[in-house]
Amino acid sequence: MAPASKADKKAAVDAAAWMFNVVTSVGIILVNKALMATYDFSYATTLTGLHFATTTLLALVLRGLGYIQASHLPFPELLKFVFFANFSIVGMNVSLMWNSVGFYQIAKLSMIPVSCLLEVLFDKIRYSRDTKLSIAVVLLGVGVCTITDVSVNAKGFVAAFIAVWSTSLQQYYVHYLQRKYSLSSFNLLGHTAPAQAATLLLIGPFLDYWLTNRRVYTYNYNIVSVTFIILSCTIAVGTNLSQFICIGRFTAVSFQVLGHMKTILVLIMGFFFFGREGLNLQVVLGMVIAVVGMIWYGNASSKPGGKERWNISLPTSRQQKHTSLSEASEHDAKA
């Protein structure tokens, strides 16, 4: 009975973490859509910097209250993470500007095979045939849903290439740092958010001016738009935290596969909020295919041999220093 209850508890926590990520991610997409489309606040990089600044403030408050314990992350590791994360944000914004919506979606879909490659190369993960096929079905379904016109140019391809690889590396690195330095999601976010906030708020206004030919300080701020900005920043705290929690629990590939459920939900929410024009037979068919692929992936990857590491796991810094303590911690983690 004990092993079953432990498995049930883990499944419940996984489901809660994933639902937290879905709710905050879909919520911030809808809020940002209203902010940019209705209130013409098109400064995406600066807004992301404000998101991380808000996250930093909350982390400082929680640390002061004792909810976040002191932890260590070497500066070179922090520097690499911020490099990948900021290139991901900038690359996505530039890719969306330079590419058609169709090619932008293809680029986003390609993050799954790239994330798989990173796990194979660095973590020595092996995937079964069913797991690989289920991923292909998810990609097919989301592609049918979202891809319409597809056109590409040289600079757009370069931007998409940078965006895909930097995003995949950033998501892999979240899982890597949490394992290697035994960091909780909030501890890791407490290290990375201040650095991202500082760099994005520094380069954001210049990048946004380059992308939109408009300066952020000339925007006509009013009570409604500022309220939406504050709401966006508030939801972003949950989005950032839930991303770290989910990648820590599911790995980057599973996070990407499950992440496409958010694409389906955004399409459905768009139908309810913005009318029927976005929903047609092609979109419904794609949704059905994608959901079938996600269910298949969940079953295939959880079976023995579906997705497994074929070498010893990465030792953490605490394991290297305190072997006996790490064995006890590992037992607690499995419990």
Image: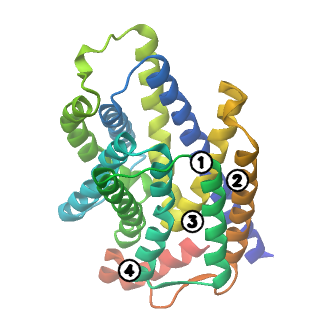
Mark 2 residue type = Gly
Q: How is the image coloured?
A: rainbow
Q: CA distance from mark 3 to mark 4?
A: 16 Å
Name the front one of labels 4 and 1. Answer: 1
Q: Which residue is mark 4?
A: 122
Q: Above or below — where is 301 with respect to 262?
A: below
Mark 4: amino acid = Phe
* Label 4 crowd (10 A; few <14 / some 14-19 / many >=20): few
| Camera-side residue of 115 and 65 | 115
In the drawing, what numbered circle is on residue 254?
A: 3
| Residue behind mark 2 | 286
Q: Secondary structure at mark 1?
A: helix
Asked if the residues shown at circle 2 and circle 1 are in contact, with their CB atoms under 8 angstroms apart, the answer is: yes
- Decide which of tag 3 and tag 4 comes sooner along the chain: 4
Which residue is at a point 21% across and 39% down the rendered structure image?
A: 198
Q: Which residue is mark 1?
A: 146
Q: What type is the residue that disc 1 sits on?
A: Thr
Indicate which disc residue 275 carries: none
Residue in the picture at 57% in, 50% down: 147
Mark with earlier residue (4, 2): 4
Upstream in sequence: badge 1 or badge 3 = 1
| Viewer-proximal residue among 313 and 127 | 127
Instruction: Single out the mark in the foreground, 4 or 2.
Output: 2
For the residue marked with disc 3, what is the amino acid?
Ser
User: Which label's residue is closer to the chain start, 2 or 1?
Assistant: 1
Please tell me whether mark 1 or mark 3 is closer to you in this view: 1
Q: Position of residue 243 (x, y in %)?
A: 48, 52
Where in the figure is residue 145, as x and y percent of width and height?
65, 49
